[in-house]
Image: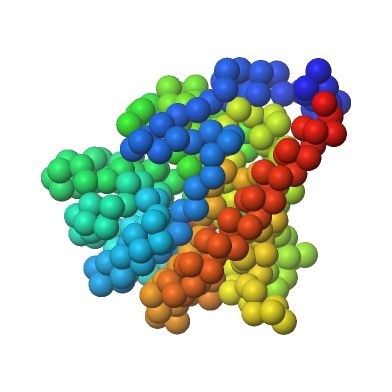
Amino acid sequence: MKYQNYQSETDYSNYLICSQNSKPNKFVYQQIEFSQESFHPFLGLCAVDNKKNVAKTMQALQEHGQLCTRMGAFKPRTSPYEFQGEGAKCLSYVFELAGKYGIKIIAMEVLNGEQIDFINKALEQAGNPTGVMLQIGTRNAQNFDLLHKVGSQTEYPVLYKRGFGATVAETINGAEYIAKAGNQKIIICLRGVKSHLADPHRNLADFAQVALLKRITNLPIGIDPSHAVGANILDQNNISDIMHAAASGTIAGANLILTDIHPTPAQALVDKKQAIHINQIGWLLEDLQITRAAYLARVNLAKNINQ
Ligand code: PEP
Ligand code: MN
């Protein structure tokens, strides 16, 4: 009844674990719950550059009551001549600072299994002061060996990014690979798809599919407005296109908002054009709360009308 439009869309019967027809997927990690009802901003550094900036960012997040962040240590770059991330050597200070500033979960991309081992070791050596959500980047969305690796451990949840040219079915199958390997702590993250039609944005935001994915799958669905839009372009009200994109996904029910921020965006070593200044964290969070509240009001309205 509730999902009566299902069959007409396509045949989703191959999604044995991640389907809406399977049991609801709620999980708790580091005492934080993730589900299709939850809402968590993950603001942080696209790439860790130095200890000072990690400290400044985490301190600012703590001042705004944030428990989650993103911190890229291993960066997949289009050009081999660009900064590839600080790598394993930054993990000890990132984890130690997370403990100091009360950060409970860090979303961090991994490109291979060895990097999961580095994270394991560094967390252990630091005395497990924080948690990690393993990010699968858009370029690895169909790296099935890697999907199997993050799926065959159950300690860390997985933030699975949509491939930049992947269909909805391919995206859910990617999540299904992870689940089938044994780990059902998965969040799918939309981050825009590659199209020249997006220009001057970096990718074409696909956030109208938040509701679609929440209907087909049982997974929490996130959005990454920073990598979708790719530039902190301001409108006539000084509102960034990134905030507008974040709003569009949030008002449609997104469960996780991954956004690049930096203490000095102009000096960021990766994706500096899209980093929002840490002084604007308060504004960004308040703006998100407006659209989150609007989403919840829309759900109530629909409930009343359909009673
Ligand atoms: C990122 O989030 O840092 C990133 C590289 O994103 P994507 O894989 O979506 O490009
Ligand atoms: Mn980036």
* Quadrant of the rendered image containing residue 86: bottom left
Q: Is residue 142 above or below residue 27?
A: below
Residue 243 coordinates in the image, percent (x, y): 62, 65
* Quadrant of the rendered image containing residue 274: bottom right
Q: Is residue 217 above or below residue 140?
A: above
Residue 25 coordinates in the image, percent (x, y): 53, 26
Q: Is residue 247 left or right of residue 176?
A: right
Residue 196 coordinates in the image, percent (x, y): 74, 65
Residue 89 in view of the camera: no
Q: Exactly how many numbered labels are in the figure?
A: 0
Image quadrant for the N terminus? top right
Of residues 306 and 26, the one drawn nearer to the viewer in this rendering? 306
Residue 296 in view of the camera: yes
**Residue located 77% across and 65% down the image:** 197
* Quadrant of the rendered image containing residue 30: top left
Image quadrant for the C terminus? top right
Q: Is residue 83 above or below residue 288?
A: below
**Residue located 67% across and 43% down the image:** 296
Indicate how the structure is coloured in the image: rainbow
**Residue located 59% across and 74% down the image:** 232
**Residue located 48% across and 42% down the image:** 159
Of residues 80 and 229, the one drawn nearer to the viewer in this rendering? 229
Residue 204 coordinates in the image, percent (x, y): 71, 59
